[in-house]
Image (tube, helix red, strand yellow):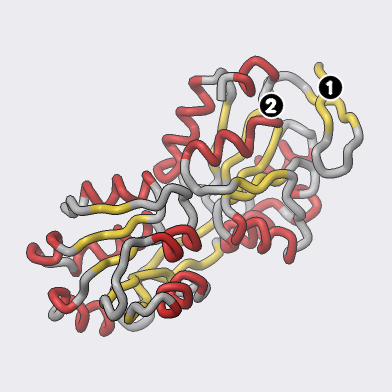
């Protein structure tokens, strides 16, 4: 047993050794996070709380596939966007410049065949939109999920770009419950819960219950996710400044054993 400080309430709470970090993301999408924690001797487990499906109306994707040469840039703000758009991209579109929100999205774009890829210094959608090296009147294609907000396109339009935002995929919250993770949370076996999108916060609540979510500190990846967590009654203990691995490790550091936290 050891003593940690509860980051939300400021009270010291007893924690058992052998706890783990719960990441509300499919393991295939969180492998680099799990591995990074494993390298520091900390166990992480993944809970998939969302389903990703094709768009309700694929006609936009079909249409844009015939005129990809019209665009100066393709902007990807998630790995899901790359995966959804990839089947519609022809060979010549791989020559179009790509802006990717962070390293994971850039890697996905590179695997999909794009080579001219720009990423912002700070891995957030707002930073991408504010610092992307565009000229006025450049045309930007923005494939995105149905739940995406308008921050990125609004900033790009203010900077003089023409933005064509299309729905490339849909995100739905899984109705499936997770009794095992709920039991672990209620038994204080979870060091912290990591959520990386507003939809993931909603999915987590459905999967384990709001009361169970309140038993462990919430770590929100990015300010948009942090705001959603607050709105849903789960004020985060930590909000990462970026959505890359460095931001993740910095955000979870207070919930790692002292020696592992120093390794970040």
Question: Compared to 147, does 243 lie above or below?
Answer: above
Which residue: 55% across, 61% down?
174
Q: Tell me which label, 2 or 1, sits earlier in the chain.
A: 1
Q: Which-is-in-front pick, marks 2 and 1?
A: 1
Spot the residue most to the left. 92
Instruction: Say the numbered circle drawn on residue 187.
Output: none
Q: Position of residue 53 (x, y in %)?
A: 39, 67
Which residue: 70% across, 31% down?
254
Q: Position of residue 260 (x, y in %)?
A: 61, 19
Which residue: 28% across, 83% down?
60
Which residue lies under the disc numbered 1? Answer: 3
Task: Name the image quarter holding the C terminus.
Answer: top right
Instruction: Say the numbered circle drawn on residue 19.
Output: 2
In the image, taking residue 57 as reference, residue 181 lies left or right, namely: right
Whether residue 3 can be seen here: yes
Task: Tell which of 57 and 174 is nearer to you.
Answer: 57
Task: Tell which of 150 and 34 is nearer to you.
Answer: 150
């Amino acid at each position: 047993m050891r003593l940690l400080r509860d980051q939300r309430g400021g009270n010291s709470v007893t924690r058992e050794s052998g706890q783990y970090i719960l990441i509300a993301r499919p393991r295939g999408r969180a492998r680099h996070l799990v591995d990074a924690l494993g390298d520091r001797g900390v166990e992480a487990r993944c809970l998939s709380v969302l389903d990703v499906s094709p768009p309700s109306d694929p006609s936009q994707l079909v249409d844009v596939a015939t005129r990809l040469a019209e665009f100066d840039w393709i902007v990807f703000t998630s790995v899901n966007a790359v995966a959804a758009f990839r089947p519609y991209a022809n060979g010549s579109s791989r020559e179009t410049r790509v802006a990717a929100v962070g390293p994971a999205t850039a890697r996905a774009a590179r695997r999909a065949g794009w080579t001219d890829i720009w990423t912002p210094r700070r891995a957030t959608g707002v930073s991408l939109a504010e610092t992307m090296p565009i000229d006025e009147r450049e045309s930007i294609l923005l494939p995105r999920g149905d739940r995406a907000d308008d921050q990125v396109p609004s900033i790009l339009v203010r900077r003089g770009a023409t933005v064509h935002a299309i729905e490339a995929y849909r995100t739905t919250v899984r109705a499936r419950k997770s009794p095992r993770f709920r039991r672990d949370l209620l038994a204080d076996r979870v060091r912290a819960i990591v959520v990386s999108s507003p939809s993931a916060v909603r999915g987590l609540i459905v999967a384990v219950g709001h009361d169970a979510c309140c038993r462990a500190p919430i770590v929100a990846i990015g300010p948009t996710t942090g705001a959603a967590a607050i709105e849903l009654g789960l004020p985060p203990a930590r909000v990462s400044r970026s959505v890359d691995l460095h931001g993740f490790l910095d955000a979870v550091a207070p919930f790692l054993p002292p020696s592992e936290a120093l390794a970040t």
